[in-house]
Amino acid sequence: MVQLAVFGAGRIGQIHARNAAAQPGFHVKYIVDPVEGPARDALAKTTGARIVSAEEVFADPKLHAIVIASSTSSHAPLVHRAAETGKAVFCEKPVSLDFALTQSAVAAVVAAGIPCMLGFQRRYDAAFRALQARVASGEAGRLEHLIMQSRDPAPPPISYVKTSGGMFRDTAIHDVDMARFLLGEEIASVYAKGSCLISPEIGQAGDVDTLMITLTTESGRLAQVINCRRGPMGYDQRLEAVCAREVLRVENAPQGTLHVLRPEGTLAPPPMNYFLERYAQAYRDEMAGFAALITDGTPPLATARDGLEAQRLVEAAIRSHETGQVVVMAPGWRP
Ligand SMILES: NC(=O)c1ccc[n+]([C@@H]2O[C@H](COP(=O)([O-])OP(=O)(O)OC[C@H]3O[C@@H](n4cnc5c(N)ncnc54)[C@H](O)[C@@H]3O)[C@@H](O)[C@H]2O)c1
């Protein structure tokens, strides 16, 4: 039985701890979250875990792995502690809002040789995975360009915006990671533009609420990322991959299957409400991926290096947005 500790009993910690507890071969031994409250207690009760301090976790030689689902600023120090104590790590994105800290945490993982995976759950989503497999099989022909659209149902609270690291680091990191996953080639240049079109409060906080990023690969293939803090029709997660022989498209996942057909037109069911619903199965599958990594060394779909590369790209996008220039991703480019 693999013994685990889950850090963070917030939004995503609740999901990961429950999925880990349901994973055959996994036992959630500890929950760590310094903030007391009913959500933390209920999570410990449901998973059968004990609430302990981080010190207790890292002092336990029988503890095999940690799941880092706590606030972003805690990720890099926890990754370092896991590397020092030889524990496997599942780390939510991003490793850190500070690129240098991400670099040093990823270097520590590599030097220690601990199993590690990043929480890019879209790579585990059945639809995106099937698209990637079809591209990789060669059936569709060469993937020439990609269009990715990600829109939240509504802007988050301004308190969230202020600690998020900004929209590029907070949301676009998933899309640039997906571009690397599907294109299977490194990005050679980045051009980005952001704007504040929805919420003046977000602008006053120094962030954008709408952004686009154009990525160009070393062989000249193109990907367009479109992110927005508001989707007028709800949570919007669509992707189109234009290949030499086929167009591959992932549509929004509907809440139901009821279509209302009337003389004036057809009313389709709305998209799933938000990421916790849309990616519920992907979160379960990525925890199964973590189990496979620990038990038989199956490589995860998202590695620590993928976390670093996605972060390099969003940092380049921020630089491009701020300067109006294309950022050429020379080997070793750093923010
Ligand atoms: N991959 C995804 O789809 C996805 C979705 C949501 C959040 N996230 C990431 O997960 C992380 C958490 O996000 P959230 O929305 O659950 O936040 P949240 O604020 O709901 O929960 C974070 C929890 O971590 C706890 N915490 C803070 N410092 C801690 C520490 N040192 N040790 C243990 N617990 C600590 C807080 O008390 C809080 O309960 C963020 O890094 C976020 O970017 C990823």
Image (spheres, helix red, strand yellow):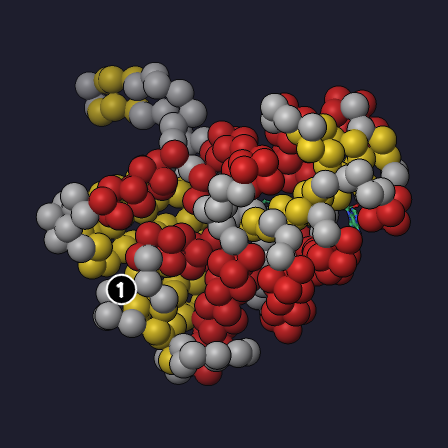
* Image position of 147 with respect to 335: above or below: above
Q: Residue at x 36, y 25 (%)?
A: 269
The one nearer the camera, 192 or 155, is 192
- When asked about the image quadrant of residue 103, the answer is bottom right
Q: Quadrant of the N terminus?
A: top right
Taking the image as shown, residue 205 lies to the left or right of residue 334, namely: right
Q: Quadrant of the C terminus?
A: bottom right
Measured as percent of width and height from the top left, residue 296 is found at: 54, 37
Q: Residue at x 43, y 25 (%)?
A: 255
Dot 1 lies on which element?
strand
Measured as percent of width and height from the top left, residue 222 is found at: 27, 64
Measured as percent of width and height from the top left, residue 104 is found at: 66, 69
Taking the image as shown, residue 198 lies to the left or right of residue 291, namely: left
* Image position of 237 with respect to 325: above or below: above
* Image position of 197 with respect to 8: above or below: below
Tell me if the residue at label 1 has its CB under 8 Å from ligand 1: no
Taking the image as shown, residue 316 lies to the left or right of residue 67, namely: left
The reply to whether residue 102 is visible in this rendering is: no
The count of marks equals 1
* Image position of 221 with respect to 159: above or below: below
Q: Residue at x 39, y 63 (%)?
A: 212
The reply to whether residue 118 is visible in this rendering is: yes
- When asked about the image quadrant of residue 25, the answer is top right
Q: Residue at x 45, y 39 (%)?
A: 124
Q: To which residue does mark 1 refer?
A: 222
* Number of other residues with Cα within 10 Å of mark 1, as a class: few under 14, some 14 to 19, many 20 or more: some
Looking at numbered disc 1 in the image, what kind of residue is underneath it?
Answer: Leu
Measured as percent of width and height from the top left, residue 17 is found at: 68, 33
The one nearer the camera, 26 or 130, is 26
